[in-house]
């Protein structure tokens, strides 16, 4: 609770400073609209009818990308992490691709898949998959060997080992990787929409930026940031809940 109040206080202070800087003329409103300017334009944006469908389109693409990337990334990461041979053979490849900026490959997605929803979802999956897989590998390899030896000594079946040992110990670390992966998937989808798309929040942000509509631009960025923060905090709350036993 104290941490949340501290974060809210910092954000509120930043908004106060931002408002003061613009109100006292230290920065021109033509370059930086104030928070009140941004809030004033939001009802108009909603009333025009383009904003909510755009948010819905981006959110749907993120949900689909998450539904594909999370189980696929966890499965690949678990198989690689559990097998020393696969870790040596495939692990370096996954680590390498995790470090490469994925935006470099967006033109290939556009050329091969066009500019529709499939291309944005695929790019979102591409953004998230490697992060989730690598975090799952680390989670598998962090399971204490002593626990595995005890499970084998008790003649636990493979399914029981997975359910009673691997899953409880891995879950907090895997969820952390999923949280980061989903955030990267969302940023990838927004980037794809900004570059070339007919729908989505990213497309509107690009239009507002190109048209020098700074109030609308900042409002769009604020909406995207709010969505990211909400997702992050939801994941953090669940991570803390499932990870309590490890700190007990």
Image (tube, rainbow, N blue to C red):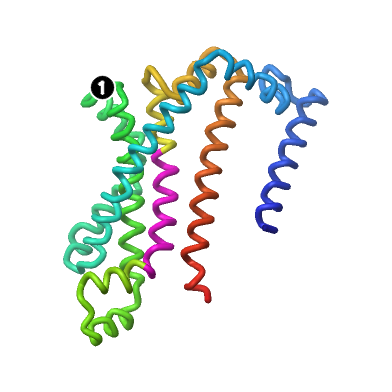
> Is residue 112 or residue 9 the one in the foreground?
9
Horizontal side of 113 relative to 227 (left or right) equals: left
Quadrant hosting residue 79: bottom left
Q: Which residues are magenta?
A: 168-185
**Residue 80 vertical placement versus 37 (above, below):** below
Label 1: which secondary element: loop
Residue at horizontal 17%, vertical 66%? 85
Q: Where 163 falls versus 136 (above or below)?
A: below
**Residue 230 forms part of the magenta stretch:** no
Magenta part, dominant SS: helix
Which residue is label 1 attached to? 114
The image position of residue 208, as x and y in percent, is 54, 17
Which image quarter is the N terminus in?
A: bottom right
Q: Is residue 148 above or below residue 13?
A: below
| Residue 108: image location, x then y, percent | 25, 29
Taking depth in this image into account, of 207 and 88 the one nearest to the observer is 207
Which residue is depicted at the point 27% across and 81% down? 151
Query: Badge 1 local density, few (<14 within 10 Å), some, or many (20+)?
Result: some
Answer whether residue 184 is magenta in the image: yes
Q: Residue at x 70, y 28 (%)?
A: 35
Locate residue 89 relative to residue 172 in the image: left or right: left
Image mark count: 1
Establish if 38 lies above or below 64: above
Q: Residue at x 26, y 61 (%)?
A: 78
């Amino acid at each position: 609770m104290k941490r949340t109040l501290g974060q809210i206080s910092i954000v509120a202070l930043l908004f106060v400073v931002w408002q003061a800087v613009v109100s006292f003329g230290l920065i021109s409103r033509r370059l930086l609209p104030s928070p009140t300017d941004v809030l004033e334009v939001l009802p108009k944006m909603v009333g025009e009818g383009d904003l909510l469908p755009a948010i819905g389109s981006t959110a749907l693409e993120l949900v689909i990308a998450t539904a594909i990337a999370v189980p696929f990334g966890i499965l690949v990461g678990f198989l690689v992490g559990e097998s020393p041979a696969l870790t040596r053979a495939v692990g370096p490849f996954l680590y390498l691709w995790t470090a490469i900026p994925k935006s470099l490959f967006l033109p290939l997605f556009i050329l091969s898949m066009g500019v529709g929803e499939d291309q944005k979802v695929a790019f979102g999956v591409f953004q998230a998959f490697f992060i989730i897989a690598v975090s799952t590998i680390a989670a598998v390899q962090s399971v204490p060997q002593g626990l595995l030896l005890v499970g084998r000594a008790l003649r636990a079946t493979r399914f029981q080992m997975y359910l009673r040992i691997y899953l409880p110990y891995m879950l907090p670390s895997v969820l952390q990787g999923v949280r980061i992966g989903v955030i990267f998937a969302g940023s990838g989808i927004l980037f794809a929409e900004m570059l070339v798309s007919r729908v989505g929040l990213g497309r509107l942000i690009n239009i507002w930026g190109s048209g020098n509509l700074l109030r609308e631009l900042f409002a769009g960025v604020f909406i995207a940031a709010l969505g990211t923060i909400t997702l992050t905090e939801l994941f953090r709350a669940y991570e803390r809940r499932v990870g309590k036993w490890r700190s007990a």
